[in-house]
Image: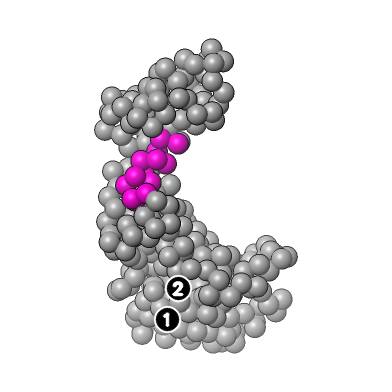
Amino acid sequence: MPTDLLSAHILLVDDSLDELRLLKDVLDVHRFRMSIAFDGHQGYQRAKTLHPDLILLDVRMPKMDGFSACRLLKADPLTRDIPVIFLSAANAAEERLTGLSIGGVDYVNKPFLPEEVLARVRIHLSLSARMAPASGLAMQLSPSAIAPDEVLLQAGIAVICQHLGEPITVDDIASSVGSHEKKLSAVFKERTGLTVFAYLREERLRVAKQWLEQGDTSVQMIAEQLGFQNAGNFSTAFRERFGLPPTAYRKLLRQGDVAPGEQCA
């Protein structure tokens, strides 16, 4: 990260030439170095190659949207520390929260005020400079050191972990990381030995087991919070995975017959 913010390199990612021109005009005045990409996939690839100091990323784009691109950026050690500021014409609280929850540092509504864009860029460049890892690990890695399939896997896992309690499909997960069901399924199977659905189910059961160990949340509530159809469905899945139903597991915990984290049967 340059100590002189005026020498900072900013990657602009937007499919609109007019918007790119406006952003370039704003940043040109302060002589920032700039690179451009026209969709999320190209933006992610350019970020890996150029390692900019900050990314201004449009949300709605063809081929790959900004949210999908951000998930890949945050799953890749080469790019995960680059601050991402989202740009969007949709002034919806839910969309802003999504952007922040997947790793964006800020959100600017379109049409934007030049002064606001500039202020937010300066703030996050300064924050990034202070928080930059002393080791500089990301800069030491070569692009070939990070397998694209591993990035896709980690991005997919992040989506799964964020949506454990929701009725989400494999296609939903794939589209959230700019991929498709067949590709994502192949990556999960090759790298985890599980299908995407099996991994989702395993993660839900792992979290359920933790909740049983750590508190008094009812079996019904755990089932609802983790996306199971009902308590009976959850109990069946838990018994198949751990050898006994959740109520029996909790009873053993209270009696001291099994330690938290220990395999049940």
Q: Secondary structure at mark 2?
A: helix
Left or right? Give the position of 47 relative to 204.
right
Instruction: Identify the coloring.
Output: one colour
**Which residue is located at x 34 percent, y 66 percent?**
178
Left or right? Give the position of 123 relative to 243.
right
Return the x and y of residue 231 as percentages of the image width and height: 31, 25
What is the magenta segment's predominant secondary structure? helix
Q: Which residues are magenta?
A: 194-206
The quarter of the picture where the N terminus appears is bottom right
**Which residue is located at x 33 percent, y 50 percent?**
195
**Which residue is located at x 27 percent, y 50 percent?**
169
**Which residue is located at x 45 percent, y 36 percent?**
206
Query: Does the rendering let one see residue 79?
Result: no
Q: Which residue does the numbered mark 1 point to in the structure image?
A: 37
Return the x and y of residue 223 as percentages of the image width and height: 35, 30
The quarter of the picture where the C terminus appears is top left
Task: Indicate yes or no whether the magenta region holds residue 187.
Answer: no
Q: Which residue does the numbered mark 2 point to in the structure image?
A: 44
